[in-house]
Image (cartoon, rainbow, N blue to C red):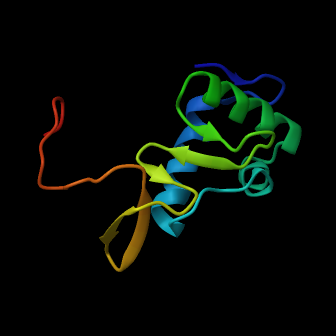
Amino acid sequence: MKSSRKHGIPDHDIRHFIYTTFAGTCRPPTTRETAGHFGISIAAVESAYERLAAAHHIALAPGSHAIWMAHPFSGIPTNYAAEAEHKKYRLYMSYDPRLQFEGSS
């Protein structure tokens, strides 16, 4: 995975921050929050978000850099939700945590 070129932040670190933020707050981070976390420009974050979207790791709202989805999390209301540790997550699909998927332990 590439990095935010000038700043040397690997895209996988930005992706991890996106998922960590979703898990902790039940919503995606903004470009400003991501830039602040890594100490990089919003333009660098936007470029990283575009690369992550092109690689299908996240989905962006049309014409913006707002994160709509980081599978299975949704940044917009959906018909599916899951609750864990008193948090309610919006999902893009129905998910049963009791299921074991290939590669899961």
Looking at the image, which residue is at 54% across and 27% down? 56
Find residue 80 and report its horizontal and vertical position in percent. 37, 61
> Which quarter of the image is occupied by the N terminus?
top right
Looking at the image, which residue is at 78% across and 55% down? 36
Residue that sits furthest to the bottom in the current view: 86
> Which quarter of the image is occupied by the C terminus?
top left
Find residue 15 and report its horizontal and vertical position in percent. 56, 39
Residue 41 visible from this viewpoint: no
Find residue 84 and report its horizontal and vertical position in percent. 30, 70
Looking at the image, which residue is at 73% across and 47% down? 38
Looking at the image, which residue is at 53% across and 68% down? 25
31 versus 26 height, above or below: above
Q: Nearer the viewer, residue 12 or 55?
A: 55
Q: Quadrant of residue 41?
A: top right
Residue that sits furthest to the front in the current view: 79
Residue 84 visible from this viewpoint: yes
Q: Is residue 30 left or right of residue 13?
A: right
Q: Is residue 77 left or right of residue 45?
A: left
Q: Quadrant of residue 89?
A: bottom left
Q: Nearer the viewer, residue 7 or 56?
A: 56
60 versus 73 height, above or below: above
Q: How many badges with numbers are in the image?
A: 0
